[in-house]
Image (spheres, coloured by chain):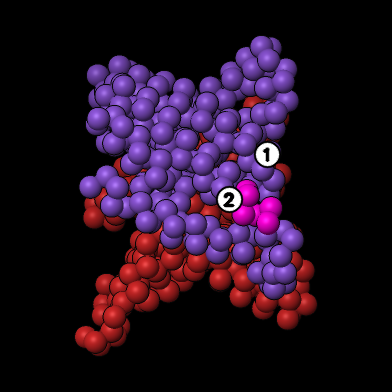
Amino acid sequence: MDMLLLAIGAIFVNNILLAQYLGNCPFCGVSKKLSTALGMGAAVTFVAVVASMLTWAVYHYLLAPQGLEYLKTLVFILVIAALVQFAEIFIKKQSKVLYDSLGIFLPLITTNCAVMGIALLNIKHGFGFVQTVVFSAASAAGFALAILLFACVRERLFISPVPSAMRGTAIALVTAGVMSLAFMGFTGMTN
Amino acid sequence: MNFRQTLTHGFWRDLPPFRLVLGLCPALAVTAAAENGLGMGLAVTFVLIFSNMFISLLRRVIPDKVRIASFIVVIATLVVLVELVMKAYFFPLSQQLGIYIPLIVVNCIILGRAEAFASRNPVHLSMADGLSVGLGFTMSLTLVGSIREILGAGTWFGLAVFSEGFEAFSFMVKAPGAFLCLGLMLGLMNAWSRRRGEIFIQT
């Protein structure tokens, strides 16, 4: 039951994008079409879950016993960068179809703050391993959900008459604000 | 660009996060209060000046293929430094900013300036560029923070602005207010630049 609560909380109530403001660059950048948003969502989910497991292990078995907790920022970003590079090579070798659909998004994920943010949040909340896996999968799913919904709105927005000064990023941010307002409606769910 | 232009381009022409649409996450996340915006901006400015300096010094040493990874190591080292200094001397602020301090590592402005400017310009110009873009970012963050704090909490840098009867719209200090405020400000800036006959940057 606690795990379910944790998952629902991470997907809806504390949505990583709309309540924690992480991962906004890809949110605004690649959400113009539904298909690319789907690719980005899938890529982030995959990397975030694996990265969280790795960084959790590195933090608890390597850094904490040596008293080197303050190096976590430096070590985590290196782990994530190496993982992304590795994932790219692995996927290219294993599945051409998946590589072609994710290909361009994978390198971008290194500097996606959602991945790094989830890894840091796991440590900050003091999660155990299972909780870490559930929390990162749910947070990443929340990211994918938000970016998919947003892509649908933006496809519709593209054919709407928007005042010229508001076109592009400006109207995207206002739309995200309205979506975030809708997500605030979930606030009572986990209490 | 000459020295003077480099020193001032971050204040309007390439003002982050509006004109360069980079670094949106901290701009949204920490601007619930003007003080947090100012603190975050100054932290980013520090990292930006010195990451530009080191990357510019090392630009002939770093091989082209691994440059992004090398830039990230330089930036991450500086961010760890900022994190420790903030914890030691500005403890309440560092608690307020929370995980957004380590997340300066993945702030795209810093990597963006390293790639676009510091890796191909001499040291003094790169440091000037870091200072300029960093102060521009600080300015924007403080401004967004002020607007949100005044409307959302009725205070400015913690001091009361309105009289007792003011009903604050707490919506502004929450997530939706951040998106809305930034979006509307971007729209205003676009309208203003168009009146001055400048070209749009975002599409």
Q: Position of residue A52 (x, y in %)?
A: 41, 26
Q: Which residues are magenta?
A: A151-156
**Residue A67 vs residue A89: left or right?**
left
Q: Position of residue A1 (x, y in %)?
A: 25, 30
Q: Secondary structure at mark 1?
A: helix
The picture quadrant where one finds residue A112 is top right
Q: Which color was chain B given?
A: red
Residue corresponding to mark 1: A36
Residue A183 in view, yes or no:
yes
Which secondary structure type mostly characterizes the magenta part of the structure? helix
For disc 1, the chain is A
The picture quadrant where one finds residue A2 is top left
* Name of the residue lying farthest toward the top: A94
**Residue B48 vs residue B61: left or right?**
left
Q: Nearer the viewer, residue A84 or B122?
A: A84
The picture quadrant where one finds residue B10 is bottom right
Residue at left offset 56%, top offset 61% = A175
**Amino acid type shown at disc 1:** Thr
Residue A150, labelled with which disc? 2
Q: Nearer the viewer, residue A121 or B82?
A: A121
Residue at left offset 56%, top offset 71% = B184
Choose the circle earlier in sequence order: 1 or 2: 1
Residue at left offset 58%, top offset 43% = A148
Q: Residues within 10 Å of mark 2 (few under 14, many from 20)?
A: many
